[in-house]
Image (cartoon, rainbow, N blue to C red):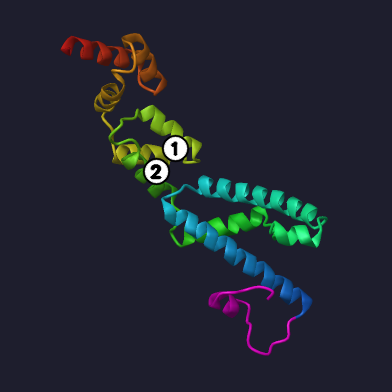
Amino acid sequence: FDFSLEIPQVVDLHLKVGKALSAAELKKCRKESEFGKLYHHSLEYCLTRPHSVKEVWDHLVKRRKNRELANRQAVKNRERTKEDQIKYKLRTREQPLYTDADIERVISRLIEKKYLDDARFAEFYVENRFVKKGISKKRLYQELAKKGIEKDLIDQALAKNPRDESEEIQKIIKRKRDKYTRDKLISYLTRQGFDYQQSKDAVLGMDSQN
């Protein structure tokens, strides 16, 4: 066994039974096979939950680094005895590595097939992030920016799914009121991205209701 291809890849490569392939054509087939595997891995990753483009890029870069480490270990394993290789089921074969260009190609395909969409991801994130626990607009913005979402897309998502800061802050106070003193609760709220005066007023308002 050398490599596997899907039917669309076979068609694109103009392959047919009995066709003799040159060394260059075989190399191209192997590369397409690896691309297919990388694409399907990425597709499965995207289907677990919505992801941003940056998340998929970072995931594939991390996967490549892990593969590089595994390859170095495979080289070391080949120096072990055959008995040890069999006994401990040691990997001795190196896995093919992919380039940044391969990652870009995968991401382009995912965007084309609409499995990746930063605007849709931003809307999903704003709509579902800490709905019951509460979250500040500032923290939502920071988290989305960290995931590589552009400012205009964040603004659109926040406008389409507005969060009432006063309601969000009350959700957090209800969860944390028994864990913190008044001053520490105010500090906690400001660390979560709420305005200091708003946090102070909300906590003092809570005290006046007791």
Whole-number angstrom distance, CA of label 1 to CA of label 2: 7 Å
Residue depicted at x 64% and y 69%: 32
Mark 1 crowdedness (10 Å alpha carbons): few <14, some 14-19, many ≥20: many
Secondary structure state at the residue bearing disc 2: helix
Image quarter of residue 177? top left
**Mark before the other along the chain sequence, 1 or 2:** 2
Mark 2 crowdedness (10 Å alpha carbons): few <14, some 14-19, many ≥20: many
Nearest the camera: 194 or 49? 49
Residue depicted at x 44% and y 48%: 118
* Main secondary-structure element of the magenta-colored stretch: loop
Amino acid found under the numbered disc labelled 1:
Leu
**Whole-percent x, y for residue 10 in the image:** 59, 78
- Whether residue 99 sits left or right of residue 124 in the image: it is right
> For mark 2, what is the residue?
122
**Whole-percent x, y for residue 153 in the image:** 41, 42
Nearest the camera: 75 or 189? 75
Image quadrant in which the C terminus is located: top left
Q: Does residue 93 appear anywhere in the picture?
A: no
Secondary structure state at the residue bearing disc 1: helix
> For mark 1, what is the residue?
144
Most distant residue in the left direction: 209
Residue depicted at x 49% and y 59%: 43
Specify the segment rendered in magenta.
1-21
- Whether the magenta-drawn stretch holds residue 58 is answered as no
Most distant residue in the bottom direction: 18
Amino acid found under the numbered disc labelled 2:
Ala
